[in-house]
Amino acid sequence: MTSTTKYKSIPERFLDRCNLSFEGRPAFRYKKNDEWLELHYNELRDKVFCLALSLMELGIRSGDRVGIVSENRIEWIISSLAISTIGAIDVPLFPILTSKQEEAIFRDCTATAVIVSNNFQLSKILEFKDNLNSLRHIILMSDEELSIKDVFVHNLNELIERGCNFRTREDRELIICEQISKINPDDLLTLIYTSGTTGDPKGVMLTHGNLLANIDGASSRLPELHKYESLMYLPLCHSYERLAGFYVLFFGGTLITLAESIEAVPSNVLEVKPSLITTVPKMLETIKKKVYISIEKESKITQRIFKWALDVGRKKSLLDSENKSNSFVNTQYRIAEKLVLSKLREKLGGRMKLFISGGAPLPVEVGHFFHAIGITVLQGYGLTEASPVVAINSLDNNEIGTIGLPLPNLNVKLAEDGEILVKGPNVMKGYWNDPVASNIAIDGEGWLYTGDIGEFTDKGNLKITDRKKNIFVSSGGKNIAPQPIENLISQSRYIDNCVLIGDNREYITALITPNFEQLKTLADNFEIICNNTTELISDSRIIQLIKDEIDFYQRDLSKFERIRKFRLLSEPFSVNGGELSPKMSIKRHIVERKYSDLIEMMYKS
């Protein structure tokens, strides 16, 4: 299957988007020095073109690899677009990587230059710069004074200014447009290195044609994007946010606001009042839990009204999904909307209409909750090797608990063991310098093996059951999918994360990270005196409470699926600790290795 897009490259589409901007509406909004600033399409185009000229002046050419090591910021957007405009290939990395990890990746791709956000990131590159003969330039995004004075270190804003001083604007556009015309759909746009659960990470080669096809496919499920204003908080260096949160929304005309940080999302939501957010299930689960916790502090009558309003919201949502109407429910809904539902939405700025969720399965109850309060959640699915979106629900076909229909410009089928296979113009070119791994991932007929297990519903929508490598086979021969069970247990207000253990074991156990804020409230109620979290989770009353919660949520599971033993962990999972990926997914192999002694104790005692 080939792409039907009318564009040859991302820069060509970018130029077209800027020429068709919406009546002076800004393209991006970002905060600097505690003030929200706007960047309009024509300003963005000028900065991209000027930086592109300076990169060419530095000797960076088509096909060169240029690293980006930065948190989300407007300079990330400008840098990525400028790199692609001259036909070079960006290599975005998570800024939490160590200097050693960065060196391995930039050595593998023989990076010519690296663009970094600040002096801290610069210092990591300087640790290995002399070891990489290919690395000729380092560019600093921030305006802070350079920590080193050297001819190979440049300031990004100074490069933009230098490019702007090059001849006239017409001359600059002529040169850049000529560069853009030379880019072909099969040329590489980006190298995105996978996290590498075992061994070294692999560089996923994605072409301009791959991303253009995926933009077209995903955009067909998300019409009228120009009517939305979004808040971007997920890492741009991850393929999900880059495609869904950046490319699809930008080319659709959405005004994109860059959140200051993940921690600042709650305050930024109230400041900018977005109507759309690309997100991960963990954020949505957290919002739902906080709502329920706050309601439990209210009077009994308020709690009953809240429960009634949610029930009415669910009924209305179900009727809407089936294109049905009921006058009695409609009347109730108007009352529920005024008393409760609108007030819940006010906590999210008051204009929220749509969450696009990906990166992990969305618990069904979480989806129903948001639909009940009047906010649509569209769950999607993908992987970096597929550019990344494979399937997503749409506004007119949104089956909660599924990832929707496969995109219209690709094919999906299930292997005999249920593994999802994908074929289409979005499938990667392969892994950089790794033909063996490429041939394992993509067979001779062009089918990409995703490693995910799925099934189709009666409505034809795709549903993920688990990762193929995560499926447990108990010592009794039972197949157990851990992720749905973990999601179920994590619904407890007292449990933050749950990691099941049980592959080739006699029974299922779990490692639990509690919600310490809730446990400390309980400790006060129980008059438990403790000096730290280790003492708190050792108290028999706390342990019994968590056991009761687990038993409550797993009451409908089969006997072989139930957790028999568990251990509470004294520290929450974190990105810096290595247990969570930057998109908040649990790194199971890291957790199992880190807590191997605790795990073995559960099977010995």
Image (cartoon, rainbow, N blue to C red):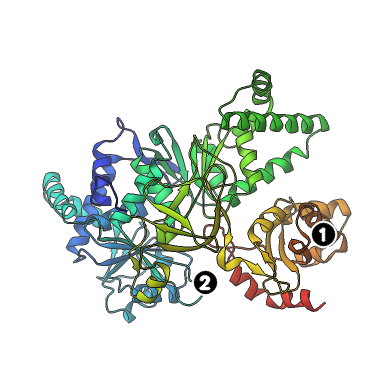
Which residue is more in the foreground, 148 or 7?
Answer: 7
Residue 37 placement, left or right of 287: left
> Does 572 appear above or below 308?
below
Residue 11 in view in this figure? yes
> Does 463 appear above or below 472?
above
Q: Position of residue 247 (x, y in %)?
A: 36, 48
- Per the image, label 2 sits on a secondary structure element best described as loop
Instruction: Tell me the quarter of the image containing the C terminus.
Output: bottom right
Q: Position of residue 351 (x, y in %)?
A: 52, 32
In the rendered structure, which disc, 1 or 2, sits on the residue that comes first in sequence?
Answer: 2
Cα gap from disc 1 to disc 2, whole angstroms? 31 Å
**Residue under the image location 72 percent in, 41 percent down:** 292
Q: Amino acid at mark 2?
A: Thr
**Contact, mark 1 vs mark 2 (Cβ under 8 Å):** no
Q: Quadrant of residue 306?
A: top right
Q: Residues within 10 Å of mark 1 (few under 14, many from 20)?
A: some
Which residue is more in the foreground, 53 or 561?
Answer: 561
Q: Position of residue 125 (x, y in %)?
A: 38, 72
Q: Report the residue that reaches farthest toward the bottom.
A: 131
- Per the image, label 1 sits on a secondary structure element best described as helix
Q: Quadrant of residue 573?
A: bottom right
**Residue under the image location 27 percent in, 79 percent down:** 133
Q: Amino acid at mark 1?
A: Lys
> Does 339 appear above or below 388?
above
Mark 1, residue position: 547
Q: Position of residue 103 (x, y in %)?
A: 39, 75
Residue 577 in view in this figure? no
Q: Residues within 10 Å of mark 2 (few under 14, many from 20)?
A: few
Mark 2, residue position: 197
Residue 63 placement, left or right of 227: left
> Does 373 appear above or below 151?
above
Which residue is more in the foreground, 74 or 494?
Answer: 494
